[in-house]
Image (cartoon, grey):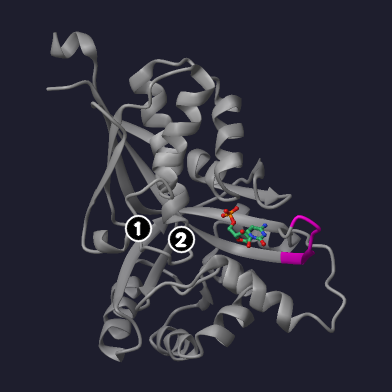
Amino acid sequence: MRPAVTVRVPAKVNVQLAVGAARPDGFHDLANVFLAVGLYDEVTAALADELRVTCSGPDAAQVPLDATNLAARAALALAERYGIDPAVHLHIAKDIPVAGGMAGGSADGAAALVACDALWGTGASRDELLAICAELGSDVPFSLVGGAALGTGRGEKLTPIEVGGTFHWVFAVADGGLSTPAVYGEFDRLTAETEVPGPTASPALLAALRSGDPAALAGALSNDLQPAALSLRPSLADTLAAGTDAGALAALVSGSGPTTAFLVPDEETAGKVAAALLTSGTCRNARVAVSPAPGVTATSCITASDTA
Ligand code: C5P
């Protein structure tokens, strides 16, 4: 058996996504309140003869296995920084919806970075790892830390947020993905004639997270990308309605979509809403999950001395 490290990484939902005007670099300033949810990918990094990526899971066919995969880019970035040969086999056991607005690709980037760091024993500090995450993508640093955090800048500058309880969710997985740049582009088109205010975190939302009260959180959820996602995929309105009709406290598009998120009061309602969504014919799958969830966590580590 070759030395290998396996880590687990959560999906996220944005309980607030306040989007500012496009910046000169093309990104948008955000007040992005991330909440990690308990749907997980697992990434295993094993010493190999050359860099390669494989993927398993029901949606594995939709995952790119070339150098565009954020897991591969993470391994390359870390190897380059430490002068290491990036000869590693990265296997992604995929359970997070692909291209769904739940940061599945970002999760795999953060997971691969932590797994390779442990495998290679680089001894990188957490701040160094977070800096590499920020280079890889706006959502990648949050995938590493998990829990709940406010992301400012383009979403990469994180401040931890206190959460006072467990929130229950149902996620409706749509057919096909939505491109994040396309959704931001549609946001720009829809807001072209308006003055877009600077994004700020909602005090009511932060208080709701602190209280752990799902009814309070339901009243404070917001996503400025939702009109853009609905404009590109109008059928998502039917999914949102199907979940609220079935008893969800609130519904919103997750990030840039097309996954939709339903906040429910308890586990029992989660089951009912998931069943109703599945029979509604408005989504491909419905998943139940709780939040907050921890960030990247090692689940198995086989070192060179174990294999000697
Ligand atoms: O940072 P990441 O690679 O995840 O961003 C993907 C795309 O999403 C960017 O190329 C950009 O079009 C858009 N984006 C943005 N503003 C942000 C984050 C992402 O416009 N704050």
Would you name the residue on which mark 1 appears? 96
Quarter of the image for the N terminus: give it. Answer: top left
Q: Residue at x 48, y 65 (%)?
A: 101
**Residues packed near mark 1 inside 10 Å, few (<14), some (14 to 19) or many (20 plus):** many
The three-letter amino acid code for the residue at tag 1 is: Ile
Question: Is 132 displayed left or right of 258 in the figure?
Answer: right
Tag 2–tag 1 contact (CB < 8 Å): yes
Seen from the viewer's position, the closer of residues 219 and 303 is 303
Is there any visible trace of residue 237 in the rendered image?
yes
Question: Is 190 displayed left or right of 273 in the figure?
Answer: right
The three-letter amino acid code for the residue at tag 2 is: Met
Look at the picture and state if 256 lies above or below 192. Answer: above
Q: Residue at x 42, y 30 (%)?
A: 114
Which of the two labelled residues, at mark 2 and mark 1, occupies the earlier sequence position? 1
Look at the picture and state if 17 lies above or below 147. Answer: below
Look at the picture and state if 173 lies above or below 149. Answer: below
Residue 288, percent from left and from top? 33, 66
Residue 263, percent from left and from top? 47, 71
The span picked out in magenta is 19-25
Would you name the residue on which mark 2 appears? 102
Quarter of the image for the C terminus: give it. Answer: top left
Picture quadrant of residue 264: bottom left
Residue 130, percent from left and from top? 58, 33
Q: Is residue 24 magenta?
A: yes
Q: Is residue 275 magenta?
A: no
Disc tally is 2
